[in-house]
Image: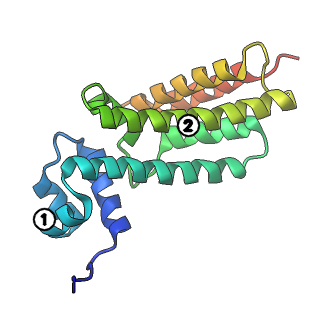
């Protein structure tokens, strides 16, 4: 009879994700992971596989949590403009627990060009985010809040590119006030000119 696990997989996966997020894939050793996750090396291998397999699982974990969080935030907004502002706020201010920029942007910039599995996973997250943004833009166009001078696809692409840029900025010493100002200006550009 096998031993029961002495840890919660979700909890230790979250810990692994946070360590990869803070240090990056290359700088994180198996010893670092074992120590940070608080489990034995054998348990880590038995449950998650090697370092690369664990990393891919942390990308999936991030995707699930972020998708739920964005959906929740957007469901609490009344207008498309409020939704866009809420997304900018998440991107600019993140959370105190994870102040290391965007995990997916970090993964894409560190590994996607040389790791096909990471590229596929990060592309899937980007497409999912673009889909949410496009729905928001369409909502704004249908209500007359956002301009129809460009297609929803074009506006969603521009907005997503801007948000990715903001996420890169958050990894620097960029002034949050400047990023908030950028968000406000972008929302003004989206609005219909009556």
Task: Please give the residue where the numbered disc 1 appears in the rendered image.
Answer: 41
Residue, x 71% and y 23% (percent of image)?
152
Residue 140, percent from left and from top:
78, 31
Question: How far apart are labels 1 and 2 at the CA level?
Answer: 35 Å
Residue at the left extreme of this rendering:
31
- Depth check: give the residue in front, 72 or 52: 52
Residue 115, quarter of picture: top left
- Depth check: give the residue in front, 2 or 23: 2
In the rendered image, the vertical position of residue 147 relative to residue 179, given as above or below: above
Residue 160, percent from left and from top:
55, 27
Residue 172, percent from left and from top:
34, 31
Q: Residues within 10 Å of mark 1 (few under 14, many from 20)?
A: some
Q: Quadrant of the N terminus?
A: bottom left
> Which one is earlier in the sequence, the residue at label 1 or at label 2?
1
Q: Quadrant of the C terminus?
A: top right
Task: Please give the residue where the numbered disc 2 appears in the rendered image.
Answer: 129
Query: Which type of secondary structure does the marked residue at label 1 adopt?
Result: helix
């Amino acid at each position: 009879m096998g031993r029961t696990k002495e840890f919660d997989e979700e909890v230790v996966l979250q810990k692994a994700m946070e360590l990869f997020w803070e240090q990056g894939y290359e700088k994180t050793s198996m010893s670092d992971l074992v120590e940070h996750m608080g489990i034995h090396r054998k348990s880590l291998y038995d449950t998650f596989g090697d370092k690369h397999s664990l990393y891919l699982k942390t990308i999936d974990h991030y995707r699930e949590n972020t998708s739920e969080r964005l959906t929740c935030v957007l469901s609490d907004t009344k207008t498309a403009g409020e939704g866009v502002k809420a997304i900018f706020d998440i991107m600019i201010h993140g959370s105190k627990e994870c102040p290391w920029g965007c995990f997916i942007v970090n993964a894409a910039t560190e590994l996607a060009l040389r790791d096909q599995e990471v590229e596929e996973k990060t592309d899937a997250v980007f497409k999912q985010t673009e889909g949410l943004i496009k729905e928001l833009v369409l909502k704004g166009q249908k209500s007359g809040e956002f301009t129809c001078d460009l297609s929803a696809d074009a506006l969603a692409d521009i907005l997503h590119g801007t948000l990715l840029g903001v996420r890169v900025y958050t990894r620097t010493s960029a002034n949050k006030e400047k990023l908030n100002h950028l968000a406000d200006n972008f929302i003004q550009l989206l609005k219909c000119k009556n």
